[in-house]
Image (cartoon, rainbow, N blue to C red):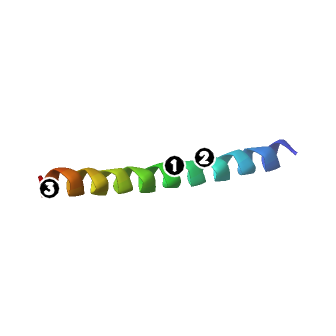
Amino acid sequence: MPLLTTLIMFTVAVLLSRASVNLGFKLLDIIKAKYGAS
């Protein structure tokens, strides 16, 4: 059971890190678009 819990926690951590990286790139694109135009 602890092994399964660890696996689930690891999967959640990986998904969260990927989501945060994607969000960071989206924010970077938005900032580039705003300050690049002006």
| Sequence-first tag of 3 and 2 | 2
Locate the N terminus and report the quarter of the image it occupies: top right
Residue at far left of view:
38
Q: Secondary structure at mark 2?
A: helix
Q: Secondary structure at mark 3?
A: helix
Q: Are marks 3 and 2 in contact (CB under 8 Å)?
A: no
| Number of disc labels | 3
Q: What is the C-alpha distance between the residues marked 3 and 1?
A: 28 Å
User: Which numbered tag is attached to residue 33?
Assistant: none
Q: Which residue is nearer to you in this view: 28 or 18?
A: 28
Side of 32 where 23 appears, left or right = right
| Sequence-first tag of 3 and 1 | 1
Q: Secondary structure at mark 1?
A: helix
Instruction: Give the residue pinned by disc 2.
Output: 13
Q: Position of residue 33 (x, y in %)?
A: 22, 57
Instruction: Give the residue pinned by disc 3.
Output: 36
Q: Position of residue 6 (x, y in %)?
A: 74, 44
